Image (cartoon, rainbow, N blue to C red):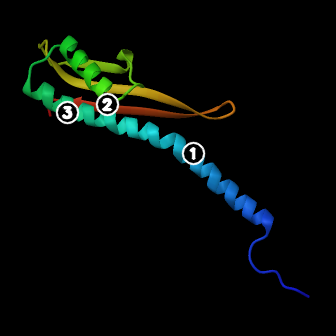
Amino acid sequence: MHKQRGMTLLSWLFVLGLIGFFAIVAMRLIPMYQEYYGVMQITKSMENEIRQNQLTKQQVMILLQKRFNTGYISSVDKDDIELIRGKNNVHVSRIIIDYEKRVPFMAHIDLVGHFRTEADAEK
């Protein structure tokens, strides 16, 4: 009688299926997080900008839109950005970006990421 060594064809298919599943998940999630890290870098640079200069809400929105365009950030809308002024001040002292990104996964299933980042010039 011959003893079986190693994996069967069914075992190999199962392992390859798991590897394929996690590869698809990674291919969908990595670009989402790369965009989030771009938003974080822009937010940190804007923190320095609003700390050094006294900018109004309109000026901050223009600077953010320009930086989002050059950084290929497409998930953040104007409605996702909250600009807060300091006490008794017309200048922006805090930026909050809170947005959601949906990526199609398979069939009718989407992967959803909810991201939030803040820049506070009064720290």
Q: Earlier in the sequence, mark 1 or mark 3?
A: 1
- Which residue is the site of mark 1? 25
Under circle 3, the secondary element is helix
Q: Toward which corner of the image does residue 32 lie, by quadrant?
A: top left
Gap in angstroms between the C-alphas marked 1 and 3: 31 Å
Kindly identify the amino acid type of the residue bearing the numbered disc 3: Ser
Q: Name the spot of residue 68 as percent of width and height, x first.
A: 31, 25
Q: Residues within 10 Å of mark 2 (few under 14, many from 20)?
A: some
Q: Earlier in the sequence, mark 2 or mark 3?
A: 3
Q: Residues within 10 Å of mark 3 (few under 14, many from 20)?
A: some
Q: Residue at x 18, y 14 (%)?
A: 59
Gap in angstroms between the C-alphas marked 1 and 2: 24 Å
Q: Name the spot of residue 64 as percent of width and height, x first.
A: 26, 22
Q: Residue at x 25, y 31 (%)?
A: 43
Decide if residue 112 is on the left or right side of residue 74. Answer: right
Kindly identify the amino acid type of the residue bearing the numbered disc 1: Val
Image quarter in which the C terminus is found? top left
Q: Name the spot of residue 19 as percent of width and height, x first.
A: 62, 56
Q: Residue furthest right?
A: 1
Kindly identify the amino acid type of the residue bearing the numbered disc 2: Gly
Gap in angstroms between the C-alphas marked 2 and 3: 13 Å
Q: Residues within 10 Å of mark 1 (few under 14, many from 20)?
A: few
- Which residue is the site of mark 3? 45
Image quarter in which the N terminus is found? bottom right
Q: Depth check: give the residue in front, 110 or 17.
A: 17
Under circle 1, the secondary element is helix
Task: Relative to 12, say whether 119 is above or below.
Answer: above
Q: Nearer the viewer, mark 1 or mark 2?
A: 2
Q: Nearer the viewer, mark 2 or mark 3?
A: 2
Under circle 2, the secondary element is loop
- Which residue is the site of mark 2? 71
Q: Residue at x 77, y 80 (%)?
A: 5
